[in-house]
Image (cartoon, grey):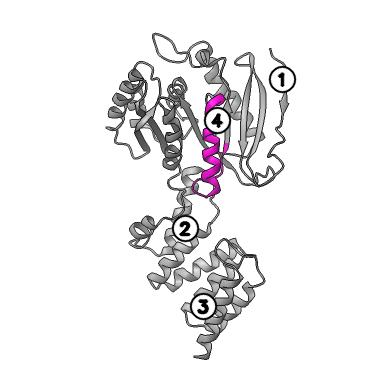
Amino acid sequence: MKKLFTFILPILFSSPLYSQAIYKTIDSEKLDDARELKIQLPRNYDSESKRTYPLVIVLDGDYLFEPIAGNIDYQAYWEDIPDCIVVGVNQANTREDDFLYDDDTYLPVNEGANYYEFLASELIPFLENNYKVSSFRVIAGHDLGANFINYFLFKDRPLFRAYIALSPDLAPEMATRLKDRLSEIEQETFYYMATADADISFLRNAIIECNAMLNTIDNQNLKYKFDNFEDANHYSLVGRGIPKALNEIFSLYKPITGKEYKEQIIPFEGSPYDYLVKKYKDIEYFYGFEKQLIENDIRAIAAACNKKNDLDALENLAKMVKKEFPNSMLSAYYMGMFHEKEGDYKRALLRYKAGLLLEPSQYIDKDIMLDKMYEAQDALKN
């Protein structure tokens, strides 16, 4: 057995402005061998905090880790998706053995079965014991790896909630098995599959047939998305499929958009504040972790409160903002906004003045607070 060794890449590790890259080699009893891992931690990752992060396992980490980790880091920076812990498993010299399946049952066998057990009973517990991972797990694969990830669906309670299958080299009967399993799955599951017009022909044909079968599934617990890219081949489709897959998997997490504002918040039967509370509770339910309130969503809900002239909702929003951001100008700004809307310009002015001593936010700074002060002062004079 290879000697166990562990080392940490110092580049980017000490700076909170960049994601942290860690390289490890771990011993596996299941494989009777050692395997190399690439691990990307979120920016500002704090091992002492209570916050947890979705776990993304990337097969064929030799070449697939960097595009997935890079996309996650970029989208998380703009708050389009949550920060995630990304782990790539290097397989350059072992992939054919790792993904081996039986010629009769088409299920993992020998080295393939051992690799399955390594991922399920060694790698995931290791990561859970050493990093702040949440219960929401994603697994991604390309080619043979994209076929292999499907075997995790066949457990009574699958280990992963989301699957990214990029141009899968599907085993015989896999399409039928996928249809049967995904039709009855009881846990909310995200499944993404992609091919392209210049994909390897026999892979593409099987994928198109599989998609036709999966499209017939009627199961509210399944969130299925398929892409058939134009002007892409077996390798270039990976770069186009990754952001689409992440966008689909974390669609509920995304900041409120103009479309969501018009089509969901304004027609919502309850108050805009109730919509916000429900949205964040749904995120916690689906992804297994709490999303921190973001300024984009605060602005959208405040605009809806004003449009619907819902003072109670605006007051509740202001109180929530004050609780979440007590040292930020946000707390003073929205409480001042509420007092303005109720016609109490004196209290609004006091809030805005107090806000000058607090920390600016992404959108609210001293200039904006001064403008609001002058508006409140003018209203008092009139």
Residue identifier under label 3: 339
| Relative image position of residue 237 (x, y in whole percent) | 41, 30
Residue 103, quarter of the rendered image:
top left
Residue identifier under label 2: 277
Q: What's the magenta region?
A: 61-85
Residue identifier under label 1: 4
Q: Amino acid at mark 4?
A: Phe
| Mark sitting earlier along the chain (1/3) | 1
| Relative image position of residue 93 (x, y in whole percent) | 57, 15
Front-most of residues 186 and 5: 5
* Mark-to-mark CA distance, 3 and 2: 22 Å
* Labels 3 and 2 touching (C-beta < 8 A): no
| Mark sitting earlier along the chain (3/2) | 2
* Residue in the image at 67% along x and 45% along y: 46
* Mark-to-mark CA distance, 4 and 2: 35 Å
Residue identifier under label 4: 65
Front-most of residues 194 and 297: 194
Q: Is residue 210 above or below residue 85?
A: above
Q: Nearer the viewer, mark 1 or mark 2?
A: 1
* Mark-to-mark CA distance, 1 and 3: 63 Å
| Relative image position of residue 222 (x, y in whole percent) | 37, 37
Residue 58 in view (yes/no): no
| Relative image position of residue 133 (x, y in whole percent) | 59, 38
* Mark-to-mark CA distance, 1 and 2: 48 Å
Please state, as top left, top right, bottom left or bottom right, where the N terminus lies in the image.
top right
Q: Amino acid at mark 2?
A: Val
Residue 74 within the magenta-colored segment of the rendering:
yes
Q: Amino acid at mark 1?
A: Leu
* Mark-to-mark CA distance, 3 and 4: 51 Å
Give neighbour class at mark 2: few <14, some 14-19, many 20+ (Cα, 10 Å).
Answer: few
Q: Residue furthest bottom?
A: 382
